[in-house]
Image (spheres, helix red, strand yellow):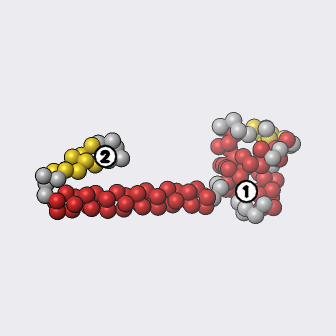
């Protein structure tokens, strides 16, 4: 009686016994399944890479990048931050930035103090 041994990706060893046609049928189904699952896995990995490449930066990421560039060496107001982002092609109104910058202050990524009656942000 014909025999076939298959080792799966998980390491399981499968032994198939039967007539030649039965063993051949099972092996062909297993190979098709393995090829399809490999193709799906490859496609999924490529989709993840493309998604990561297309990922948009959020406003907090942009403010953090300004900090890393040394923009906050001198204290800046929210309107200054909005203008700096606008110069880089990102339009964020001051009202949207206030919560984002406050969150960065709470995470201690930025500092803030009151100067001339207005809050300013820096390192």
Residue at the spot x=52%, y=59% of the render?
46
For marks 1 and 2, give the one nearer the viewer.
2
- The percent coordinates of residue 51 (x first, y second) are 55, 59
Label 2 belongs to which residue? 7
Q: Residue furthest top?
A: 108
14 left or right of 86 in image: left
Residue at the spot x=65%, y=55% of the render?
57
- The percent coordinates of residue 30 (x first, y second) are 28, 57
Residue 37 falls in image quadrant: bottom left
Mark 1 or mark 2, earlier in chain: 2
Residue at the spot x=82%, y=53% of the render?
80
Work out which quarter of the rendered image holds the C terminus and state it.
top right
Q: Which mark is residue 94?
A: 1
Instruction: Please name whichever residue, 52 or 74, is drawn nearer the observer in this view of the structure.
Output: 52
Q: Residue furthest front?
A: 1
User: Which SS class for mark 2?
Assistant: strand
Instruction: Please name whichever residue, 9 or 79, is drawn nearer the observer in this view of the structure.
Output: 9
Q: CA distance from mark 1 to mark 2?
A: 61 Å
């Amino acid at each position: 009686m014909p025999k076939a041994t298959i080792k799966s990706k998980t390491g399981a060893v499968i032994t198939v016994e039967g007539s030649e046609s039965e063993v051949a049928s099972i092996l062909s189904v297993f190979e098709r399944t393995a090829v399809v699952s490999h193709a799906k896995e490859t496609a999924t990995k490529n989709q993840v890479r493309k998604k990561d490449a297309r990922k948009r930066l959020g406003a907090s990421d942009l403010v953090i990048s300004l900090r890393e560039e040394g923009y906050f060496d001198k204290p800046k107001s929210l309107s200054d931050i909005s203008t700096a982002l606008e110069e880089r092609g990102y339009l964020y109104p001051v009202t949207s930035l206030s919560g984002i910058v406050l969150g960065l202050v709470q995470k201690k990524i930025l500092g803030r103090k009151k100067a001339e009656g207005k809050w300013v942000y820096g390192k």
